[in-house]
Image (cartoon, grey):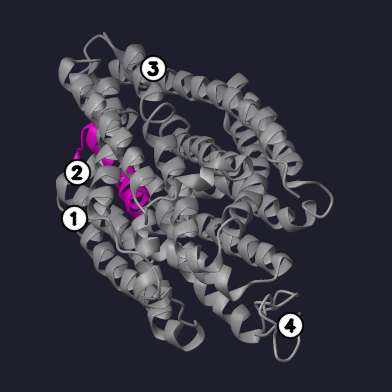
Amino acid sequence: MTGTSICPDPPTPDCDDQPAVPARAGRREWLGLAVLALPTVLIGLDGTALHLAAPALSADLAPSSSQLLWIVDVYGFVVAGLLVTMGTVGDRIGRRRLLMIGAAGFLVASLLAAFATSAELLITARALLGLAGATLMPSTLSLLSNMFRDPGQRRLAIAIWMTNFMIGGMAGPLIGGVLLDRFWWGSVFLIGIPPLLLLLAVGRLLLPEYRNEHAGRIDLLSVVLSVAAILSVVYAVKETAKGGLHPGTLAVAVVGVGLGWWFVRRQLGLSEPLLDLHLFRRSAFSASLGAQTFGLYVLAAMQFLAVQYFQLVLGMSPFEAGLWMLPTTVAGIAGTLAGPYVIRLLRPGTAMTVGFLVAAPGLALMAAATGRWPVVIGLSLAGLGIQLVLALTYDVVISSAPPERAGVASGMGETGTELGIALGIAIAIAGSIVTAVYRAGVSGTAGAPDSVRDTLGSAVVEAEHLPAPLAQQLLTTARDAYTNGVQLAAVMSVVMVLILAATTAKLVRTR
């Protein structure tokens, strides 16, 4: 790819011979985009299928409520802790090479997860999937930023790239539902094997290699601090939701906050930091990254809760629950693809604000009404609005960094993505608030074993072994308690998206 030079021939000393017009991508780049779509489809497949499998694996492996949340969340937290690191690694060893290594690692970890025989082994396998996933995502996004230099083409490429998350999310419930109706829960981890094999087969043929010859060294202490800080805080919040605040969990939380403070201070003092915190001085960058993180925080939480609600409260099969999630996925795809066209009419900040204001009524509907249609309609509106926002935030984050730092910038963007998804499920919405409301609702249920306080899935399993009148009473109480938790989570989500709408309107001023 070439651009039009603005320098005379020979160039004068004050001319750096940079193209006046960004080079436009050709056939190879668009074919390469199809290859880069494979990891994003894989992630969408894996996440939504796992949500469907949660009730089945709960019955088989009997994890505690804390273990179940770690099974779902440990992937996201490991990824969030390592994404920036892997972005730097990709800058040094080559982004295509890192992508191939990650694909092979993800394949092996998927097999380990599929045949896990205990909750502890499945958590370990999910952590290894997170390690491999941390190599996949910054590689794909940074390769996109190098392959598509024209701003219009880059926005369209990122929108297509994000749409494949939605396609994977759409296919995941359907494929996962069929598998779960016929096979064991571990079969959902085998869904990603075909796209991984295809990626390994054609990636070297269609993807160019990019590396930064001047990339800085990796600061291992920063890596350890970032992962330890995230996991410590999350562990403390999980344990507090499970058993209340105790000196031990409080101490872990304090340690986590201290490690986070140390990490920030270290980044500011390093000449080649793991995380370039100076980018946060730009209000548009920081507000866009915040909108991305907390927008996904809301969307991931409500999607996870909706899938559990369909199966455990309304009694749907995994396949039926997957079908009822399709409108939400279609709405998300529409929001993503609308991004490049909306930006032609509105400034990024205005478009983000509009997206959040579209999401707010949908979340309010979920807070006010129960049943399948209010949940589907409300979640579809939320997906439409928030995915529109996400289609714009990625471009702001990537375009803020020079090409040689694309790996680090994409790592920061993906860190916000994965951290938002994981936090949405684990902490203040799906992991702690819903758990606390559920526990308060089922406490003291006459004749019910203590295990019903762990999860709604545990209550459903225990009800099968109780006399019919007591089983019906337990199920009614547990389902009502879980529904109340979901509605409270929706109320908090409305408040959050309204705050995000005001923030993006004020701070994202870039054109």
Q: Please count the marks in the image.
A: 4
Q: Disc 3 on helix, strand or loop?
A: helix
Residue 222 in view, yes or no: yes
Q: Disc 2 on helix, strand or loop?
A: helix
The magenta region covers 61-83
Q: Is residue 72 magenta?
A: yes
Amino acid at the residue labelled 3: Val
Mark 3–mark 1 Cα distance, whole angstroms, equals 31 Å
Residue contact at pointers 2 and 1, CB within 8 angstroms: yes
The quadrant of the picture occupied by the N terminus is bottom right
Q: Which of marks 3 and 1 is nearer the N terminus?
A: 1
Return the residue nearer the eye: 384 or 266: 266
Camera-near label (4 vs 2) is: 4
Camera-near label (4 vs 3) is: 4
Q: Name the residue under label 3.
A: 437
Q: Does the magenta stretch include residue 63?
A: yes
Badge 2: few (under 14), some or many (20 or more) residues near its Cα, within 10 Å?
some
Q: Earlier in the sequence, mark 2 or mark 1?
A: 2
Badge 3: few (under 14), some or many (20 or more) residues near its Cα, within 10 Å?
some
Amino acid at the residue labelled 4: Ser
Camera-near label (3 vs 2) is: 3
* Residue 329: mark in rendering: none
Residue drawn at the location 26% of the way across and 26% of the way down:
253
Q: Earlier in the sequence, mark 4 or mark 2?
A: 4
